[in-house]
Image (spheres, rainbow, N blue to C red):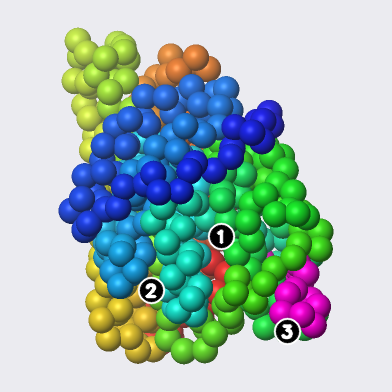
Amino acid sequence: MPIAPASLDPAPAGRAHVIADDAEALRVAAGLAAEFAPGAAVRDAERRLPVGELDRLSASGLLGIFVPAAHGGADVRARTLAEVFRLLAHADPNIAQIPQSHFAYVNVLRHQGSADQQAFLFAEILAGRRLGNAQSEPGTRHIQDIRTTLIGQGDGTYTLTGLKGYSTGALFADWIPVLAHLGPDGPLHVAYVQRHAAGVTVIDDWAGMGQRTTASGTVRLDGVRVTTERIVPHHLTFTGPQLYGAVAQLLHAAIDVGIAGAALDDGADFVRTKSRPWFESGADQASEDPLIIQRIGELAIAVRGAEALLVHAANEIDTAGEDLTAESAGRASIAVATVRAASAKVAVDVASALFEVSGTRSSLDELNLNRHWRNARTHTLHDPAVWKVQHVGRYTLNGTLPPRHGLL
C-alpha cells in the first residue's frame, strides 16, 4: 500500500553523525543491524515501509562513509563497504538494498563530478541526505536502452523527461539521480534531481513477491527543470579502466551473502528450538539427527565460502584502486563476477534448504521464514548470474577481460 508523502519528507540537514573511519563504520553498521533485525519479518509481512529505520540510517552517518576524505568523509575501503552491506542485509535485505544506488551514485560523483558539484552534493550526503535511483526503464529492449532525455533550453537549464521503473530508494530519497541522454542521441549523463521538484512523481507501485519494502516503484519525469550544475557526464566513466561497475556489483553480492547467512542462522535456530526429530533417526532432538547435521554443515560451508569470496572481491577492488589499469580493473571485475555467481546461488539454495532441515512447521505463514527465499529469489534476478560465469570462464581459459558495462 502507498504511504503518505508527508511521512517521507527528508530529515533536517545537519542531523547526521559523521563517521571517522572504517572501524567506526563497521561498529555503527553492526549496531544498526541489531536494531533492524527484530522487526524485519513484520515489516515484510505487512509491507510496512522502513521510514523510521532509514531515518536512523541517515542519522548514523553510514550514508556518508564513501565520501572522499578531502570533503570530510571516511572514504572507507571497498572491503568495509561490502561488510556494512552484508551486516545490514543479514538483518533486513530490504533496508540494505535501498541505499545500494545511493553508493553507486556517490561513486559517480567521486569520479566525474566537478569540484563545485562534489562540494555541494557531498555536503548534502554528509548531512544525511539520501540519493535514490531512476535508471532502468520499463518497456525498452534491455537495461542499456535508455530513452529519457535532457533537452537544452538555451539559458543554462535543461528539461528532463522520461519514465523509470525499478527505482529502488526513490520514494525515500532527497535527491534522485536520473540516467538520461543529453539530447535525443547524446551521451549518457546523470541528473541529480530533488525528490520534490516540479514534474517529479514517485509512484509506490512495487509489488514484487520479495524485497517488498524497498519501494522499487516508478518515477515519472515530466519536463523537470535541471541546471547544468546538477548534471554529471556519466559516459566519461567508461572511457578508461574503472571500478564503478565492480563496486556496484559488490554491494549486490553482499546483499545476497547477507540473506544466505540470515537464512542459515534462522534454520539452525529453528532446528535447535522447534523441530522434532524424524523417528527413524533415533535422536532425541532434531539437532542430533546425523542427516540434519550433515545438511547444516553443507549449507554452512557454502555460506562461509561466499563470505570469503566477498572479502576477496572487495580486496581486489581496493588493490586495483591503488594502481588502476585495464588488467587490475579486469581482475577486480572477475573477482566480483565470481562472488556474484556464487552468492546468487547460495542465497536461493540456503533459503530453500531452510525448510528442508526445519520441517513442516517452518512453513507456517505466521513465522514468515519464507521471506528469505522470496527476498533471495527476487534480488538475484537483478542481473543474470550465468553471465558472470561466462566472464569468469572466458578469463580463466583465454585471459579475456570482462566488458566495461556501465549499467550493472
Q: Quadrant of the N terminus?
A: top right
| Neighbourhood count class around disc 2 (C-alpha, 10 Å): few under 14, some 14–19, many 20 upward | many
Q: Nearer the viewer, residue 77 or 404?
A: 77
For badge 1, the amino acid type reads: Asp
For badge 2, the amino acid type reads: Ile
The vertical placement of 30 against 244, above or below, is above
Residue 8 rendering spot, x and y as whole percentages? 59, 37
What mark, if any, has residue 186 been given in the picture? Answer: 3
Is there any visible trace of residue 324 in the rendered image? Answer: yes
Residue 329 rendering spot, x and y as whole percentages? 37, 81
Residue that carries the numbered disc 1 in the rendered image: 383
Confirm whether the magenta stretch covers residue 328.
Answer: no
Earlier-in-chain disc, 3 versus 2: 3
Mark in the foreground, 3 or 2: 3
> Which span of residues is magenta-colored?
143-160
Report the residue at 70% width, 68% height from top.
226
The vertical placement of 299 against 65, above or below, is above
Report the residue at 39% width, 56% height from top.
126
Residue that carries the numbered disc 2 in the rendered image: 334
Count the marks: 3
Q: Quadrant of residue 172?
A: top right
Q: Quadrant of the C terminus?
A: bottom right
